[in-house]
Structure formats: structure tokens, C-alpha cells
Amino acid sequence: MRHVLSILLAFLLAPTSPGQDYAAHKKALQERLPHDGFTIVIQEPFVVIGDEAAADVRRRARQTVKWCVEHLKKSYFKTYPDHIIDVWLFKDRGSYIKHSKLLWGATPDTPFGYYSSSDKAIVMNIATGGGTLCHEIVHPFIAANFPSCPSWFNEGLASLYEQCGENDGEIWGYTNWRLRGLRAAIMAKELPSFEQLCATSSAAFYGPSSGRNYAQARYLMLWLQEHGKLRSYYRAFRENVRKDPSGYGTLRATLGTDDMDAWQRQWEAWALTLIP
């Protein structure tokens, strides 16, 4: 009986599947491919398309996409995106730029990769590494599970997994290159308060100070992770978002402090001790 109940519970708690026709989607993609050098791999809820060697595309679908999806589902997300999302993995910068122009009529504004909700696609220069791919995988899951999520948290959580691995069976973010910019902003006393960061509009977040904003949001996520508060903060924020759309009030409650200025000074001191 215990075994039956455990299976039933796992089924009820499992993320819902998009229920899409992957075979038909794959066939349509094959007709769209720029040339025969691409491999298509179904890895629900994604379809991975790459122009590296077929074995490399399959390996990335299994070791990066599948691994990341399974761990993100375990930690955060109950619901799949409600549509199939294509993951285009171009083998190098030249392929990335050439095929982005050919397929979507535009030159990417980032050398790494991006997620386009309108194209239902993640587009990557996979030569830059798999970290950006994990970052971009977070976005469609946020859209499906937390549609009113503000940009600062969406990008903070996604960027946490630009450099990640596994810790006791859970996805785990590590320090990365954004730490240098964060340290510089701390030393120059240029960081906004967390109240200001949480209140930042999407336009402002992605504006001239985007690098600083990404770094501050990411390392807030890292601190919450290291202190066992990240997943509980995510759940509380999502549940309370109507009353607290910026997440700042929920952050204060999660941290258990009324003096956020003092807490930020402690957080900044902690960030300066981190090793890239």
C-alpha cells in the first residue's frame, strides 16, 4: 500500500506535460532546417536542434537540457510551458549569427544566447558553454509557473544557474564572472537598495545599469541559496505576489529583519569575501 501511495503522490505532484504532438513538430522543423547538417532531438518540453556532430547534440540534450529541466522541476516548478519550445544550439559564433539572420531576420544583441517568447525558442551560441543554456531554460518555466514575476527575480534566478552543478541532488548555483562587476559596484558605493532593485521596472532593469542589476539580483539569490531560504522565498513570493508585486515585503519577511540597510551592509561584506 505504501508503494502504491508513493507512486500516486509522485504522479499528482509531477509537472503537467504540454501534451503536444512532438512527432509532428519535429517533422515541421525538418522542413525548415537551413541544411542537412542539423540534428533534432526531442527532450520534453523542448526540442533541441543543433549543427554540431549528432552525438554532441544528443549529449547536450541529455546532459544539459534534461538535467536542468529535471532539477528545476524538483526545486521550483510544477507546470511545464503550455507549448513546445525549440532550443537552437549553433556550434559557433559564425553559425549563431548567420542562422539567426536566416531564421528570424535579426542579428542577436548578445554573444551568448537568448529566449524569445514570441518565437517560442531558445537560441544559443553553444560554443560559449552550457551555463547560458541553463539560464535561458529558467525563463519559459517562470512564464508558465509565475507569470507575474518581475524581471529582477526572473533574471536573478536564471542567472544563478549560469554556473551550476548538483548539491545533495539539487541544482546549485556557484560564483561566476558577474562577481567582478558586483564587487566594483559595492566598492564604488553604486548599488541601489534592495527596495529599489525590487521596484525596478523591466525597462530600467534592462537599461544602462543592467550589468549591475543582474549581478545584484544573482548574488541575492546565491545568498538565499547558501542560507537555505531561496526555495521558500520563491514559493512565498509567488503566493503573495498580488499583495507584494515587487517581492520586497516578502524578502524582508524571509530574511526576518526590519533593518534592510543593516542587512544590505552585511550582505555586501559577505559578497566581498566570495571567490570567483
Image (cartoon, rainbow, N blue to C red):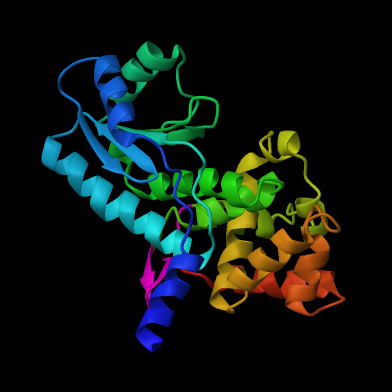
Asked whether 45 or 269 is in front, the reply is 45
Quadrant of the drawing holding the N terminus: bottom left
Q: Is residue 245 visible?
A: yes
Quadrant of the drawing holding the C terminus: bottom left
Question: Which residue is at 73% across, 62% downward?
Answer: 239
Asked whether 169 or 178 is in front, the reply is 169
Q: Would residue 255 be found to the left or right of residue 47 on screen? A: right
The picture places residue 177, in percent across and down from the top left corner, at 46, 53
Residue 39 position by quadrant: top left
The magenta span reads 165-177
Q: Would residue 79 be found to the left or right of residue 102 on screen? A: right
> Which residue is at the far front?
1
Work out whether 121 lies above or below 247.
Answer: above
The picture places residue 138, in percent across and down from the top left corner, at 50, 49
Work out whether 30 lies above or below 57.
Answer: above
Question: Which residue is at 54% across, 76% downward?
Answer: 226
The picture places residue 78, in percent across and down from the top left corner, at 53, 59
